[in-house]
Image (tube, rainbow, N blue to C red):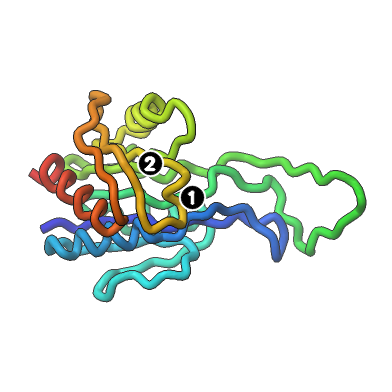
Amino acid sequence: MARILITSGPTREYLDPVRYLTNASSGRMGCSLAQAALDRGHQVVIVSGPVSIDYPAGIEVHSVITTEEMLEACRRVFPACDGLIGVAAPCDYRSRQVATDKIHKTGQPLVLELIETPDIVATLASEKRPGQWIVGFALETEDAHFRAVTKLQKKKCDLVVLNGPQAMHARETQVEIINPAGEVVANLTGMKEEVSQGIVAVIAERLMG
């Protein structure tokens, strides 16, 4: 059986001590994937951003806040894992400067300078050892298939799971699983628990030998 690292939930990038950038990721998909992997007898490690759900018992959970913290935790854990399922929705941008005190209203527009955060999946893919595999997730709103395939190739994933924004904070989802040739190898719809079982089955068939 495999030891699988799953990233889950959102990250937060603070603007000041009380405000931050984030997204609507709930962690439900990561939780469902973890349970599906456990059901198949795999060992699961989760690196999770801030969520209000409870992950299954028996799982090693590393809690983080920022994208940088998520990457650092993953880099510590991933070398001892067989593969990664990168389902987290980390913030792609952070403020260049974080205010030390609360930002107050002035009656004038507030200009923020945002810079990119590190790409967790791409970084881990560049560091993976022979035999390790990586499955990424792509949430797209336009040119979905093309953008998902581009992400898969750019980040050097073995598979990518394409979904849409309607999946965030929802109990149901619809996904396509795409291989490096750009082919849809599975199309799954239903409750996240059911879809996760299908995703893990495809991973087992195609990447675990």
User: Of label 1 and label 2, which has the lower sequence position?
Assistant: 1
Residue at 48 percent of width and 29 percent of height: 142
Residue for point 16% across, 64% down: 39
Do the CB atoms of the residues marked 1 and 2 lie less than 8 Å apart? no
Residue 76 placement: quadrant: bottom left
The residue to which callout 2 is attached is 163
Which of pointers 1 and 2 indicates the residue nearer the eye? 2
Report the Cα–Cα distance between label 1 and label 2: 15 Å
| Mark 1 Cα shell of 10 Å, populated few (<14), some (14-19), many (≥20) | many
Q: Is residue 41 left or right of residue 49?
A: left
Which residue type does callout 2 highlight? Answer: Asn
Left or right of 152? Residue 67 is: right
Amino acid type, mark 1: Pro
Quadrant, the C terminus: top left
Q: Position of residue 189 (x, y in %)?
A: 28, 46
Classify the position of the N terminus by image quarter. Answer: bottom left
Return the residue at label 1. Answer: 90
Q: Which residue is drawn at 81% across and 58% down?
A: 103
Give the numbered dot on residue 42.
none
Q: Is residue 87 visible?
A: yes
The correct choice, above or below, for 208 with respect to 3 in the image is above
Local secondary structure at mark 1: loop
Quick check: 145 above or below 186?
above
Depth check: give the residue in front, 188 or 204. 188
Foreground pick, 37 / 175: 175
